């Protein structure tokens, strides 16, 4: 009989989560419906329309969607021949179709619990890459103080913390935003570049010399914000800068107006 007792706690632990899910079924992070037994924290109805954008091949140099065999070491048709800013871009999906709708729920409609789903998807991209072993820290793109006063939700910062947790890579808030200004939404490409120029700096007391870091943001459209942040990090001595984002917009000019 004594040999049975050590096994009982193990069996209890083994079935505990199943019992809890049966009594209190987990809710889908997308619509609030039941998502019991599904590892992605989304129900089948929410997963179906986002599968295509998530499975689309993309250029690891700029993050844009590509066709089969279109990407080379020099990039894709969008970035080939252009001066590169990042060593690598990681993304979850293109900002289109059902994924765009899910992303808007996350960013604007209070579905902030989707942050965990997006972080897990993004961490898988990073863990499967060659760059995983070389990244020293995740650097969130900082938001301005006005935004922080209006809303206690900062997607880039939350995603960076979750990526650090899932990958064991350091969470490294190395940047400060020193000026606010208008939102990037609705601005042209040139206006976006001017709007973020000179708005970021290395945080006081931080040393990034020789570091290989990964910028984290929720979405990249023209890349103006991430390029400006990368410039600050490189000027401070960072050896390599890559980028991790949930969604890549800008493939359709209309996304400049709605993101």
Image: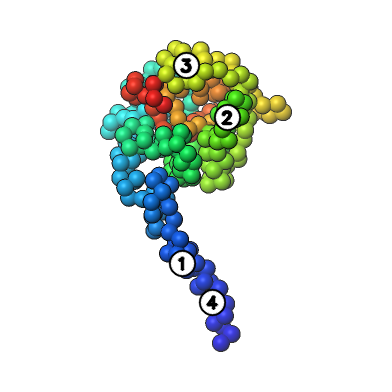
Task: State the CA–CA distance, disc 3 to disc 1.
Answer: 51 Å
Q: Give the mark nearer the N terminus: 1 vs 2.
A: 1
Q: Is residue 38 left or right of residue 227?
A: left
Task: Answer few, some or many: residues within 10 Å of disc 1's Cα (few below 14, many 20 plus, some between 14 and 19).
Answer: few
Q: Is the N terminus in the top left, top right, bottom left or bottom right quadrant?
A: bottom right
Task: Answer few, some or many: residues within 10 Å of disc 4's Cα (few below 14, many 20 plus, some between 14 and 19).
Answer: few
In the structure shown, which secondary structural element does the residue marked by tag 4 occupy?
helix
Task: State the CA–CA distance, disc 2 to disc 4.
Answer: 51 Å
In the rendered image, residue 24, in percent from the top left (x then y), is placed at: 45, 61
In the rendered image, the residue lying farthest to the right is 205
- Contact check, label 4 and label 3, Cβ < 8 Å: no
Q: Give the mark nearer the N terminus: 4 vs 3.
A: 4
Q: Which mark is residue 150?
A: 2
Q: Which mark is residue 8?
A: 4
Q: Nearer the viewer, mark 2 or mark 4?
A: 2
Residue for badge 3: 192
Please name the residue shown 55% across and 23% down the image.
Answer: 229
Q: Which mark is residue 19?
A: 1
Q: Give the mark nearer the N terminus: 3 vs 1.
A: 1
Task: State the CA–CA distance, disc 1 to disc 2.
Answer: 40 Å
Please name the residue shown 59% across and 15% down the image.
Answer: 198
Task: State the CA–CA distance, disc 3 to disc 2.
Answer: 22 Å
In the rendered image, residue 187, in percent from the top left (x then y), is placed at: 43, 16
- Contact check, label 1 and label 4, Cβ < 8 Å: no
In the rendered image, the residue lying farthest to the bottom is 1
Q: Give the mark nearer the N terminus: 3 vs 2.
A: 2
Task: State the CA–CA distance, disc 1 to disc 4.
Answer: 16 Å
Please name the residue shown 44% across and 56% down the image.
Answer: 26
Q: Is the C terminus in the top left, top right, bottom left or bottom right quadrant?
A: top left
Q: Nearer the viewer, residue 226 or 83?
A: 226
């Amino acid at each position: 009989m004594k040999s049975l007792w050590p096994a009982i706690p193990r069996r209890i632990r083994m079935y505990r989560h199943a019992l809890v899910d049966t009594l209190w079924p987990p809710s889908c992070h997308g619509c609030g419906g039941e998502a019991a037994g599904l590892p992605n924290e989304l129900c089948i109805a929410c997963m179906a329309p986002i599968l295509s954008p998530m499975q689309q091949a993309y250029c690891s140099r700029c993050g844009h969607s590509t066709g089969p065999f279109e990407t080379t070491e020099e990039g894709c048709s969008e970035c080939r021949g252009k001066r590169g800013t990042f060593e690598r871009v990681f993304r979850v999906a293109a900002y289109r179709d059902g994924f765009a709708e899910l992303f808007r729920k996350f960013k604007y409609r209070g579905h902030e619990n989707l942050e965990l789903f997006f972080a897990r998807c993004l961490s898988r991209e990073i863990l499967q890459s060659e760059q995983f072993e070389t990244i020293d820290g995740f650097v969130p793109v900082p938001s301005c103080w006005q935004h922080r006063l209006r809303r206690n939700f900062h997607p880039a910062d939350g995603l960076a913390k979750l990526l650090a947790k899932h990958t064991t890579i350091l969470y490294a808030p190395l940047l400060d935003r020193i000026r606010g200004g208008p939102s990037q939404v609705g601005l042209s490409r040139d206006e976006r570049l001017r709007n973020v120029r000179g708005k970021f700096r290395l945080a006081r007391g931080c040393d990034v010399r020789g570091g290989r870091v990964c910028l984290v943001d929720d979405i990249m459209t023209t890349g103006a914000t991430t390029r400006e942040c990368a410039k600050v990090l490189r000027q401070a001595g960072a050896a390599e800068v890559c980028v991790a984002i949930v969604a890549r917009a800008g493939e359709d000019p209309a996304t400049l107006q709605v993101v």
